[in-house]
Image: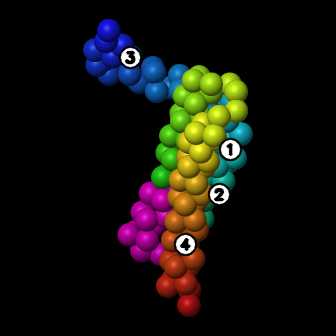
Amino acid sequence: MNNKPKYHLFKNTKYALSGLKHVLKTENSFRLELFFAIFIIFGILVIDASLTYKLILLVTGILVLIVELVNSAIENVVDLVTKQFAPLAKTAKDIGSTAVMFTILLHVICWILILWDVYA
């Protein structure tokens, strides 16, 4: 059985927007990170840094959102498989959360190093 539909640009865009709508309704972490992204983008525009530095900050900021989306997908699949406590299910969710934490840490380190280079 093949559950993969044929690729159509507009249908696939509709699926992506449906996923975004779902995540905005159900995932507090994503909404919080999206809220902070507004301030991050403002900060990127305000700092007196090179275009390369600004792109690094933008990319690492967007990466946080992407990894959070992947983490949410992992959590949804785990919840689909079992609602009962299972050590492997917990481990899968914890590893996804660790990926988000490392991505946020990477973004913060980039901010610190760039601000240090620009203003020190």
Q: How is the image coloured?
A: rainbow
Residue 82 locus on image (x, y percent) = 62, 25
Q: Residue lying farthest bottom?
A: 120
Mark 4 or mark 1, earlier in chain: 1
Q: Nearer the viewer, mark 1 or mark 2?
A: 1
Mark 1 or mark 2, earlier in chain: 1
Task: Measure how far apart labels 4 and 2 are at the Cα level.
Answer: 17 Å
Q: Which residue is mark 1?
A: 29
Task: Measure how far apart labels 4 and 1 are at the Cα level.
Answer: 20 Å
Report the disc number at residue 66. none
Q: Which residue is mark 3?
A: 11
* Amino acid type, callout 2: Phe
Mark 3 or mark 4, earlier in chain: 3
- Please report contact status of discs 4 and 2: CB closer than 8 Å, yes or no: no
Q: Which residue is mark 4?
A: 109
Residue 26 locus on image (x, y percent) = 69, 30
Task: Measure how far apart labels 1 and 2 are at the Cα level.
Answer: 16 Å
Q: Residue at x 51, y 47 (%)?
A: 67
Q: Which residue is mark 2?
A: 39
Q: Residue lying farthest top?
A: 1
What SS does tag 2 mark? Answer: helix
